């Protein structure tokens, strides 16, 4: 049976980079965060729920999701953020279940999400991989990638679970610290996962 593996880690830890390597090994990856964005733009039912909860202005006149407007509503309002997650997470979960049904001819699949633990989705998966890197390095990498300042990255880090907690709960840990080979670590985990008894 195809095992379902989650892969997570804080912002800038290198989840996506690690997933690209798993893809090179032929493993299908479900990018939950990207998929959530896509669904918010394309899933009619989800769009209606978002409009009725946060107002029609969540979408502009061209029907494009106004991310800045939505972010403004939820950024400093825990209750509103919980409401948003309560709408989006179940839609992504359903979509992920449909995706799983299309990927059964592989020893395992990967589900990449920043908030795999925070959303509770980890409970539905067979094993979890946490990608971790020192905070300074994560900040540097995200600043370079997104062209934002350190404070903006730190503000996002502070909203996620502490890295140590995600490491402690993981079945496999990838140390993406620029010292240990990322490729080797991915390959070793892949070897373990393709063994029947893991
Ligand atoms: P987010 O949570 O924001 O989606 P992420 O965990 O998916 O982040 P990546 O996008 O994979 O992180 O990595 C962040 C940035 O760091 C990217 O620009 C990536 O190319 C770079 N990066 C990741 N790992 C390494 C590495 N080992 N060496 C050099 N650069 C790296």
Image (tube, rainbow, N blue to C red):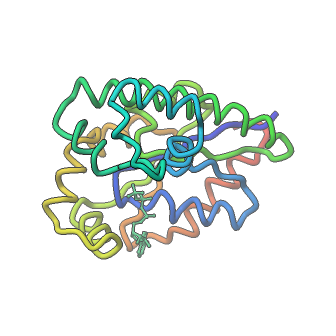
Res 13 → quadrant: bottom left
Describe residue 51's horizontal placement relative to residue 78 as left or right: right
Image coordinates for residue 191, horizontal then vertical, percent: 70, 55
Residue at image point 24% right, 50% down: 156
Image coordinates for residue 163, horizontal then vertical, percent: 30, 46
Q: Is residue 86 above or below residue 7?
A: above
Quadrant into which the N terminus falls: top right
Nearer-the-camera pick, 111 or 175: 111
Which residue extends farthest left? 151
Which residue extends farthest right? 105
Nearer-the-camera pick, 126 or 196: 126
Residue at image point 29% right, 31% down: 81
Image coordinates for residue 173, horizontal then vertical, percent: 47, 50
Which residue extends farthest front? 61
Describe residue 66's horizontal placement relative to residue 128 as left or right: left
Tell me how many marks there are.
0
Residue 99 in view (yes/no) = yes
Residue 129 in view (yes/no) = no
Image coordinates for residue 185, horizontal then vertical, percent: 55, 62
Residue at image point 68% right, 49% down: 192
Residue at image point 72% right, 39% down: 99
Ligand 1 lies in which image quarter?
A: bottom left
Quadrant into which the C terminus falls: top right
Q: Is residue 137 above or below residue 46?
A: below
Describe residue 184's horizontal placement relative to residue 77 as left or right: right
Q: Is residue 29 above or below residue 6?
A: below
Describe residue 193's horizontal placement relative to residue 37 as left or right: right
């Amino acid at each position: 049976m195809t095992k379902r593996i989650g892969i997570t880690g804080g912002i800038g830890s290198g989840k996506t980079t690690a997933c690209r390597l798993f893809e090179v090994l032929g493993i299908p990856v479900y990018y939950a965060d990207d998929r959530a964005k896509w669904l918010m733009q394309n899933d009619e039912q989800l769009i209606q729920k978002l409009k009725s909860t946060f107002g029609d202005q969540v979408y502009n006149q061209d029907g494009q999701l106004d991310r800045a407007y939505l972010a403004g509503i939820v950024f400093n309002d825990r209750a509103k953020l919980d409401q948003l997650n309560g709408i989006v997470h179940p839609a992504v979960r359903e979509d992920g279940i449909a995706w799983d049904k299309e990927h059964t001819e592989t020893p395992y699949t990967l589900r990449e999400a920043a908030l795999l633990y925070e959303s509770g989705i980890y409970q539905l998966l067979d094993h979890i991989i946490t990608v971790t890197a020192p905070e300074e390095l994560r900040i540097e990498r995200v600043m370079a990638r997104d062209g934002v300042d350190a404070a903006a990255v730190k503000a996002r880090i502070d909203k996620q679970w502490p890295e140590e907690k995600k490491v402690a709960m993981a079945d496999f840990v990838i140390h993406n610290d620029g010292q240990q080979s990322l490729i080797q670590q991915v390959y070793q985990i892949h070897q373990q996962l393709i063994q029947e008894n893991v």
